[in-house]
Amino acid sequence: MTSPHTDRWIRLDGTTNLRDLGGLPTADGGRTATGRILRSDNLQTLSDADVRRLVGELGLRQVVDLRTTAEILLEGRGPLRGVPEVTHRHFTLLPERGHHTDVFAVEEEDPQLELGAGWTESLLPRQVAAHDEGEPPAVRSYLGYLGQRSENVVGALRALTRAPGGASVVHCAAGKDRTGVVCALALAVAGVPHEEIVADYALTAEIIDALVAKLAASPTYADDMVTRDVASHTPRAETMDRLLVLLDERFDGPVGWLDAHGFGADEQAALRARLRS
């Protein structure tokens, strides 16, 4: 296995877990293209210099946000929201209360909209299939994204596929769980082997201390950061490995899951071209 190169990291003042999905080997001997799709933690604390680099140097034109409506409202508008060249798309991967399908449109209609309760109080109970109850908690969570929010997983991939040009960044709060699942599916479509997808997912462990410290500084995430130790937040290779094994067993792989959920051959080819050409 070829480990993901450390030069895939993009070092900014306001992010901890930002890296390029380019440079990963594919099963046919190629490499994924750089500058097309980035993965990141929360973008709320970007500096002015970060914004200039992302939009100017790296050509960022789309943000795909996987956080819940409550998280976005509690965190407030990040610096990229004021950049006209950048489009924002929202696809929550957690079951939540309310009926807002586009939190950014809601904000435009009511700029003073506030959320009083903590964001976890806005979530609905996660449903776990009986045959998944014995899986580790993180694996159950990931299966929950795919089972309860399949339309938004596919929506996020469609947004990445149909991006008008430039780079897209997909992110959640930490950039490891929700972002990890969406990126794993995208890399599978691009032909990146199982073990390389696992290695990319686990790469976040290298910066987990700094990532937990960053999130602990936000009132939105502080409680969750301090009530669990760093080890419990650290992504483990076996988690993504297990998810991919289950998708192999149940759907003949991630691509089979996408086929079964309406992201068919034509869209897969378009996403593959975006990540490969």
Image (spheres, rainbow, N blue to C red):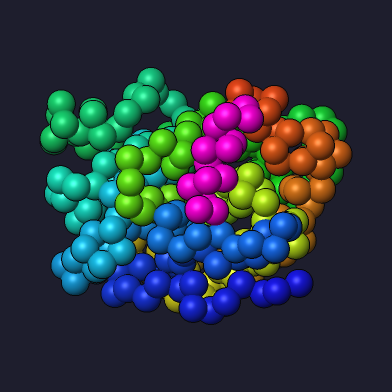
Q: Position of residue 164 (x, y in %)?
A: 32, 40
Q: Residue shown at 48%/47% (left/top)?
A: 274
**Residue 8 in the figure: left or right of residue 72:** right
Q: Is residue 13 left or right of residue 127?
A: left
Question: Who's the residue at 86% across and 39% down the image?
Answer: 249
Q: Position of residue 34 (x, y in %)?
A: 46, 63
Most distant residue in the top direction: 99
Q: Residue at x 47, y 34 (%)?
A: 158
Q: Identify which residue, 229 or 274, lies in the foreground.
A: 274
Residue 205 visible, this angle: yes
Q: Find residue 196 and report its horizontal and vertical position in percent.
A: 69, 63
Q: Which residues are magenta?
A: 264-277
Residue 254 in picture, x, y percent from top left: 71, 41
Would you say residue 27 sits in the magenta stretch? no
Counting every numbered tag in the picture gives 0
| 249 with respect to 157 (left or right) | right
Location of residue 143 with respect to 276 vertically, above or below: above
Q: Is residue 116 visible?
A: no
Residue 61 appears left or right of 259: left
Determine the residue positioned at 20% across, 33% down. 107
From this view, report whether residue 101 is shown above or below residue 19.
above
Determine which quarter of the picture holds residue 79. Answer: bottom left
Which image quadrant: the N terminus?
bottom right
- The secondary structure making up most of the magenta span is helix
Identify which residue, 32 or 248, lies in the foreground.
32
